Image (cartoon, rainbow, N blue to C red):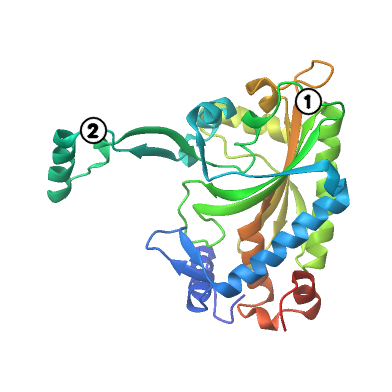
Amino acid sequence: MTDQLIVDLPVAHRQFRDQLIAAGHLIPSGLDGLYGRGAEYEAAFAGVDRIMWQAGVDAHGEENITRFRFPPIFPREAYEKTDYIASFPQLTGAISTFTGGSSEHRSLLLDREAGLPWDGHLSSAGTMLVSAACHPLYSTLPNTLPEGGSRYNVHGYCFRHEPSDDPLRMQAFRMQEFVYVGDPEGAKEHRATWTRVAHEIFVKLQLLADDVPANDPFFGRTGKMLASNQLEENLKTELVVRLYGDLDDGTALLSCNNHQDHFGTGFDISTADGEPAHSACVGIGMDRITLALFAIHGIDSADWPAPVRAALALEK
């Protein structure tokens, strides 16, 4: 990743971030984890996007996948049904707006001119920032699914409040997901299929990935129990690539998840035989994979191995 001496992990994070910024791949905003993207970066990203979509088509058949694209915000009512606020309050982003009149506006401006916080003058807009690309999907689904369940592809920006020097841990990032909603066996099969498919993709991109049983960063004492159960029941597998050598255990670029009936129950979705629907998804960290390519193969994409460039359809 760099010829400079790396002292520790935080130094490695900053060195990689600074290389990406100097090359114009990331455009800093002044906040950790919030960046614009340059043209060379977006060309590589588009290649990753094409590869992932084609992998889904090869695995399931294009005619069996419904594609959806949602905005990066969705209704608070749908957000509540995901139960995300109970499990991950530390990552959540709520949208506020001004709803007052002239008097309230004057009060806001007085606080602003005095250098005081003024966001207390705002009220909930009834919308939330999307934290996982699949979250807006479930409220759009029918209450009763067809025989055999359904498959979906969703793609979009997500927000998680975890500012970091590590460029792979962004506050605003893009995910692509392939989601199955149906019976329990179908959910298990979907997760297993994508664990295999993901390895094949990473081999093509010359990224050495390991399967790691994982859990989500659930919050609080109850969260520790949820995380333990997730590990014990083997519901989440991450594909992890070492981008910083032996300084850490690697970075998850993709996760294969079995939600069991969490969303089926929360959104009142049933299978054709009337049972609560189970769901599974592969969460593909599109920005993380793109950044991993720069970390492993070099900051200048023109120098990447020819097979990788060909797979990404990058111009010579």
Give, as a three-letter code, the residue at label 1.
Answer: Leu
Residue 93 in picture, x, y percent from top left: 45, 40
Give, as a three-letter code, the residue at label 2.
Answer: Gly
Instruction: Place residue 189 in its image quadrant.
Output: top right
Vertical placement of residue 128 versus 162, above or below: above
The numbered mark at residue 26 is none
177 or 97, which lies in front? 97
The numbered mark at residue 145 is 1
Provide the secondary structure element on which disc 1 rests: loop
Residue 282 in picture, x, y percent from top left: 73, 45
Whole-number angstrom distance, CA of label 1 to CA of label 2: 43 Å
Residue at 29% x, 37% y is: 98
Residue occupied by mark 2: 100
Residue 145 in picture, x, y percent from top left: 78, 25
| Number of numbered discs | 2
Judge whether residue 192 can be spotted in this image: yes
Give the position of the C terminus as an image quadrant. Answer: bottom right
Binning the other alpha carbons within 10 Å of mark 1 as few (below 14), some (14 to 19) or many (20 upward) gives some
Judge whether residue 249 can be spotted in this image: no
